[in-house]
């Protein structure tokens, strides 16, 4: 009799143990490690915003849902780093092969005064026809900046037209639920970016 | 005497046609290039290696080119994750010294190109140092990521 009780006790203990282990495995967040930047432990929700796409349509939070997004903040009057980064993103897009269709690359201009959506689109599509180009009023850019953790500032230049823009240099990662997932930080290496993005896309699908 | 006079006349005629400058003494400009940019770009970057072979320091106080509305010198820097650009008031080249205009550092801002440039095109840019100026031929190349 006592033997039987002991067996039941052992079985119950074993079941609890299995439950704990299973719970740990199931509830543990997918451990994705990236080389090119940092992933947030938990994706952060983004408040609603309304920008303008180069296609003439509004660009809102809904446009970030359903796929991964990589946002690059810059402006077209930046001749050194911005075109180099866009050319690098083009190489990354190519390196992703079929997975490129699961990621949207977005060039976000923080210089709406000079970058009209149309001109911004022509500039961006020179690098890849699949890249999105968006900008919008400063008030909306500020809302998005506060949510995504980017900043920008206008700096006077030699003439009123040749002012400069300081801006955050990290690439911003948005997950398919339109949440802020993390950042990719320079110096960017094409192969590492491809590897990281492939991993994110595959682990989340 | 006669030969000399006609030489001077020729020189003057040349000067009237286009402003001719004596070269900045000791200034050498190598590997001058422009990364290819979208045709709609209103600013192009200019990169080059500048060196001063002379015994006197050189100060480049202005840069211009017939193909551009204006040319400025800028310094790019990364400060706490922020990309920053600042205009420079000229460039100083110590005697037997050099300065690199390179990606991610000092560069030329070739503003308002008068026509679009594509890989293989070239443009002459003048580096001024006081009353002298040295021309450099910049070739447009595809930017390498």
Image (cartoon, helix red, strand yellow):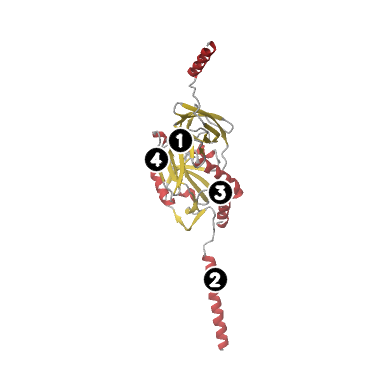
The quadrant the C terminus of chain B occupies is top right
Q: Chain of mark 2?
A: A
Residue at 40% over, 46% down: A142
Q: Which residue is mark 2?
A: A21
Q: Secondary structure at mark 2?
A: helix
Judged by depth in the image, the label closer to the viewer, 3 or 2, is: 3
Q: Which mark is residue B91?
A: 1
Relative depth, front residue between B38 and A84: A84
Q: How far, Cα to Cα, is label 2 from label 4?
A: 56 Å
Vertical side of A117 occupied by A103: above or below: below
Please say if the residues under marks 2 and 1 sit with CB atoms less than 8 Å apart: no
Q: Earlier in the sequence, mark 4 or mark 3?
A: 4
Vertical side of B114 occupied by A106: above or below: below
Relative depth, front residue between B8 and A74: B8
In x, y percent, where is residue B20?
Answer: 49, 22
Q: Chain of mark 4?
A: A
Q: How far, Cα to Cα, is label 3 from label 1?
A: 31 Å
Residue at 44% over, 51% down: A148
Relative depth, front residue between A126 and A194: A194
Q: Chain of mark 1?
A: B
Judged by depth in the image, the label closer to the viewer, 3 or 1, is: 1
Vertical side of A20 occupied by A6: above or below: below
């Amino acid at each position: 009799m006592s033997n039987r009780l002991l067996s039941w006790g052992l079985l119950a203990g074993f079941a609890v143990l299995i439950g704990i282990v299973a719970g740990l495995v199931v509830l543990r967040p997918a451990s994705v490690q990236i080389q090119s930047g940092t992933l947030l432990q938990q994706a952060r929700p983004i408040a609603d915003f309304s920008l303008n796409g180069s296609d003439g349509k509004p660009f809102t939070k809904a446009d970030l849902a359903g796929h991964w997004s990589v946002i690059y903040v810059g402006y077209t009057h930046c001749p050194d780093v911005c075109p180099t980064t866009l050319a690098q993103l083009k190489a990354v897009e190519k390196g992703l092969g079929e997975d490129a269709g699961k990621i949207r690359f977005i060039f976000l201009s923080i210089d709406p005064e000079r970058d009209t959506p149309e001109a911004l689109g022509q500039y961006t599509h020179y690098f890849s026809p699949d890249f999105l180009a968006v900008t919008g009023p400063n008030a909306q850019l500020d809302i998005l900046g506060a949510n995504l953790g980017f900043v920008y500032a206008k700096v006077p230049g030699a003439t009123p037209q040749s002012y400069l823009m300081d801006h955050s240099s990290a690439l911003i990662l948005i997950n398919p639920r339109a949440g802020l997932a993390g950042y990719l930080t320079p110096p960017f290496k094409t192969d590492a970016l491809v590897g990281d993005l492939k991993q994110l896309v595959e682990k989340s699908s | 005497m006669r030969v000399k006079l006609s030489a001077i006349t020729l020189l003057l005629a040349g000067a009237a046609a286009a402003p001719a400058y004596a070269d900045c003494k000791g200034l050498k400009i190598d590997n001058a290039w422009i990364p290819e940019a979208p045709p709609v770009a209103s600013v192009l970057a200019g990169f080059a290696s500048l060196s001063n072979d002379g015994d006197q320091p050189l100060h480049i106080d202005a840069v211009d080119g017939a193909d551009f509305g204006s040319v400025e010198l800028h310094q790019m820097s990364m400060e706490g994750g922020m990309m920053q650009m600042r205009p420079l008031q000229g460039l100083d080249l110590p005697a037997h010294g050099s300065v690199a205009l390179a990606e991610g550092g000092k560069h030329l801002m070739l503003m308002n190109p008068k026509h679009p440039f594509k890989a293989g095109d070239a443009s002459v840019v003048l580096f001024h140092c006081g009353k002298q100026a040295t021309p450099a031929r910049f070739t447009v190349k595809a930017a390498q990521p």
